[in-house]
Image (spheres, rainbow, N blue to C red):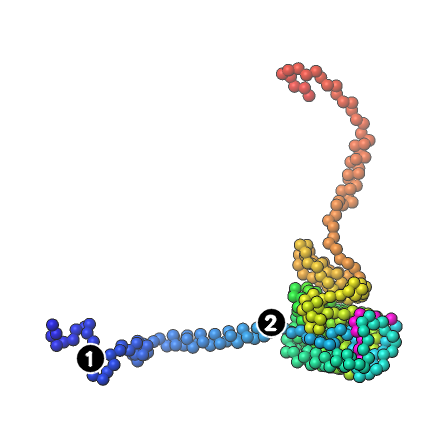
C-alpha cells in the first residue's frame, strides 16, 4: 500500500531525467574527496615507467654491439691493392692476390690462392671492398679506441679513433667473453701504426674473421708485428719485415708493400663470403704457420676444471681458479706438486743407513705351546 511517501528502497521518478545511477568517479563530490597525494603518485608512476623504458632502450642498443661486416667478393683475398703490389724477400699468402686498376706486381710473392691482376674478378673484389669499408665506417660507435692500444683490452663492439691509432708496444687484447660470433670493429680516422714486435691477442673465443680495422688513410705494420683481423685502408698498406697477419690486407686506391710476411686467411665456417659466424677454418699448413708466428703474438685459451691456461707470445693474465700467466715463447702447464723436500729426503737416507749398520739380534727360539699358557 502506497502512503504517498517514497520508501528508502524506491527510486523517485522524474520526467526527462535519466534513471541510471552515476558512478562514484563521475560524482564531483567524490572527486573533491580524493587525496591529492594519490593523483601525484599516479603521475609519478607514469613518469617512472617512461623513464625505465628509456633506460631499457638505451641498454638494449648498447648491448647489441657490432654487427659483422660482409666482405663479399673480397673475402677470398689475402692481399688486394689499388695501384701496385711490391714484395721483398719470402712472402707467403694463403689466400688470393688481387690488384685493380693497377697492373704491377713485383717481387714474386708466393700465392697459394689465385692471382687476379686488373681483371673482372679483381674489379669485383675492389667494389665489394668499398662497400664493406663504408658499412664498417657507418656502424654506430660504442666508445673511443683511445690513441694508443698498448696494454688495453676490448670487449665486442665498435670503437672509434677520430684521427690516428697506434699500438706502440706489447699487445692489445680482444675478449669475446665466450661468444665465437663476437665482432670487433675499429674505425680509424687517418692512420693505423703498430710498433715492432707488437701483437693483437684473441681470448675467450674471439676469432680473427670477426675483427675489422677500417682505416681512413694508410696502415703500417711494424717489424715482427703479429697482427689479427682484416685491414680495409682507403689508401695504402705497408707490412714491414717479418710481420705476420692472420687476416687480410685490403687497400682501396694505393699500394700494398710486403717484406718477408706470412698472411693466413681468416674465414668463418658458416660464411664463405667472410661475413663472420661459426668456427674459423684453417688448413693444416695455415695452422702450422700461425703456431710458428705465435711466438710473437696471438693468444689462445683453454678452459678446464683446473682453471684457464693461456699460451701466448706475450704476457697475458687470465682469470679463474688456477689461472696461469704465460711468458714470451713459453707454453704454460699446471705445475706439479713437489713429491718431497730435500730435507725430508736426506733424513730418510740417514735413517736407512743407521738401520743397515745396526747388527740384527738372533731370533728367539719358539717355545712349546701348552694349553692355557701364553707364548710370547
In magenta, the rendered stretch is 90-99
Which x, y percent locates residue 147?
A: 72, 77
- Cβ–Cβ under 8 Å for marks 1 and 2: no
Magenta segment's dominant SS is strand
- Front disc: 1 or 2: 1
Q: Is the residue 272 above or below the residue 120 in the image?
A: above
Q: Quadrant of residue 78?
A: bottom right
Residue at x-position 68% and y-position 78% = 136
Residue at x-position 25% and y-position 81% = 18
Is 81 placed left or right of 277 in the picture? right
Q: Quadrant of residue 35?
A: bottom left
Q: Nearer the viewer, residue 210 or 30?
A: 210
Residue at x-position 64% and y-position 75% = 142
How many residues crowd mark 2 within 10 Å: few (<14), some (14–19), many (20+)? few
Quarter occupied by the N terminus: bottom left
In the rendered structure, which disc, 1 or 2, sits on the residue that comes first in sequence? 1
Is 10 placed left or right of 217 in the picture? left
How far is mark 1 from mark 2, CA to CA? 66 Å
Residue 169 in view (yes/no): no
Residue 91 among magenta residues: yes
Residue at x-position 18% and y-position 73% = 8
Which x, y percent locates residue 108?
A: 87, 75
Quarter occupied by the C terminus: top right
Give the labeled residue for mark 1.
13
How many residues crowd mark 1 within 10 Å: few (<14), some (14–19), many (20+)? few
Extreme residue toward the front, this view: 120
- Give SS at disc 2: helix
- Give SS at disc 1: loop
Residue 154 among magenta residues: no
Disc assigned to residue 63: 2
Residue 322 in view (yes/no): yes
Q: Is the residue 59 above or below the residue 299 in the image?
A: below
Amino acid at each position: 500500500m502506497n502512503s504517498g511517501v517514497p520508501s528508502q528502497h524506491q527510486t523517485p521518478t522524474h520526467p526527462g531525467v535519466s534513471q541510471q545511477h552515476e558512478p562514484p568517479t563521475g560524482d564531483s563530490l567524490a572527486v573533491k574527496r580524493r587525496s591529492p597525494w594519490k593523483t601525484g603518485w599516479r603521475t609519478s608512476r607514469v613518469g617512472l615507467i617512461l623513464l625505465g623504458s628509456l633506460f631499457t632502450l638505451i641498454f638494449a642498443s648498447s648491448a647489441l654491439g657490432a654487427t659483422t661486416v660482409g666482405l663479399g667478393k673480397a673475402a677470398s683475398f689475402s692481399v688486394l691493392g689499388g695501384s701496385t703490389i711490391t714484395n721483398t724477400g719470402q712472402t707467403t699468402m694463403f689466400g688470393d692476390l688481387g690488384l685493380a686498376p693497377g697492373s704491377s706486381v713485383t717481387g714474386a710473392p708466393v700465392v697459394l690462392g689465385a692471382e687476379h691482376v686488373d681483371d673482372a674478378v679483381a674489379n669485383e673484389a675492389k667494389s665489394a671492398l668499398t662497400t664493406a669499408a663504408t658499412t664498417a665506417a657507418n656502424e654506430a660507435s660504442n666508445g673511443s679506441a683511445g690513441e694508443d692500444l698498448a696494454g688495453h683490452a676490448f670487449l665486442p663492439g665498435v670503437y672509434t679513433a677520430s684521427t690516428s691509432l697506434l699500438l706502440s708496444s706489447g699487445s692489445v687484447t680482444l675478449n669475446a667473453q665466450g661468444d665465437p660470433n663476437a665482432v670487433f670493429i675499429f674505425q680509424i680516422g687517418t692512420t693505423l701504426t703498430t710498433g715492432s714486435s707488437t701483437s693483437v691477442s684473441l681470448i675467450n673465443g674471439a676469432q680473427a674473421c670477426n675483427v675489422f680495422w677500417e682505416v681512413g688513410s694508410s696502415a703500417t705494420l711494424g717489424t715482427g708485428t703479429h697482427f689479427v683481423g682484416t685491414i680495409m685502408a682507403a689508401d695504402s698498406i705497408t707490412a714491414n719485415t717479418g710481420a705476420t697477419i692472420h687476416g687480410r690486407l685490403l687497400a682501396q686506391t694505393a699500394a700494398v708493400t710486403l717484406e718477408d710476411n706470412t698472411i693466413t686467411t681468416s674465414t668463418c665456417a658458416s660464411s664463405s663470403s667472410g661475413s663472420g659466424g661459426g668456427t674459423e677454418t684453417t688448413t693444416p699448413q695455415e695452422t702450422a704457420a700461425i703456431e710458428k708466428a705465435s711466438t710473437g703474438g696471438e693468444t689462445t685459451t683453454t678452459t678446464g676444471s683446473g682453471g684457464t691456461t693461456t699460451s701466448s707470445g706475450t704476457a697475458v693474465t687470465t682469470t679463474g681458479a688456477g689461472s696461469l700467466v704465460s711468458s714470451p715463447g713459453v707454453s704454460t702447464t699446471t705445475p706439479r706438486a713437489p713429491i718431497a723436500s730435500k730435507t725430508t729426503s736426506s733424513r730418510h737416507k740417514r735413517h736407512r743407513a743407521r738401520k743397515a749398520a745396526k747388527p740384527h739380534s738372533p731370533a728367539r727360539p719358539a717355545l712349546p705351546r701348552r694349553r692355557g699358557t701364553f707364548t710370547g
